Image (tube, helix red, strand yellow):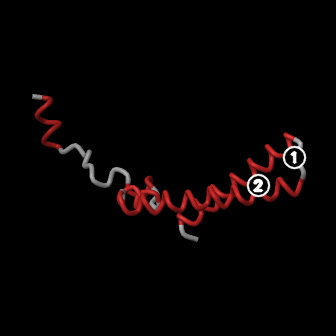
Amino acid sequence: MKTSVRIILTVAGGAFVLSSLVGLVAGVRLGVILIRSLVGAGAFGALSFVALHLIQIYLPELAEAVGHNPSSYSGGAVDISVGEDDSEEQRA
């Protein structure tokens, strides 16, 4: 499953759960809770879709970084090895 779909479903699911819990605590009827939760989940899912789309257009390097595991390539561009010449110069 693509990362963007996972993000959208996570945001929509979180909105649904949060809206349902708040409705239950407030004592709202079950039918109204379900309608409000579905509408809220759809709205937040659409909002996250638009946000991800804008990020892919205007910040493509950020969109690429979301899909990669940073531990797999971190430090690949940095050479931190110490050569024998450096250690000899410091001793003298």
For label 2, the residue is 36
Rendered location of residue 88, percent (x, y): 13, 36
Rendered location of residue 31, percent (x, y): 87, 58
| Quarter of the image that includes the N terminus | bottom right
CB contact under 8 Å: marks 2 and 1 = yes
In the picture, the disc for residue 11 is none
- Between 35 and 1, which is closer to the camera in this rendering? 35
Q: Earlier in the sequence, mark 2 or mark 1?
A: 1
Amino acid carrying mark 2 in the image: Arg
Element on which disc 1 rests = loop
- Between 1 and 34, which is closer to the camera in this rendering? 34
Q: Among all residues in the image, which is located at the extreme bottom?
A: 1
At horizontal 39% and vertical 55% (from top left) the residue drawn is 62
Element on which disc 2 rests = helix
Does residue 3 appear to the left or right of 21 in the view shown?
left
Work out whether 60 lies above or below 24: below
At horizontal 38% and vertical 57% (from top left) the residue drawn is 73
At horizontal 79% and vertical 59% (from top left) the residue drawn is 35
Say few, some or many: other residues with alpha carbon within 10 Å of mark 1 (under 14 / 14 to 19 / 20 or more): few
Work out whether 82 lies above or below 74: above
Does residue 48 appear to the left or right of 43 in the view shown?
left
For label 1, the residue is 28
| Labels in figure, total | 2
- Quarter of the image for residue 22 reads top right
Amino acid carrying mark 1 in the image: Val
Say few, some or many: other residues with alpha carbon within 10 Å of mark 2 (under 14 / 14 to 19 / 20 or more): some
Between the residue at mark 2 and the residue at mark 1, the CA separation in whole angstroms equals: 10 Å
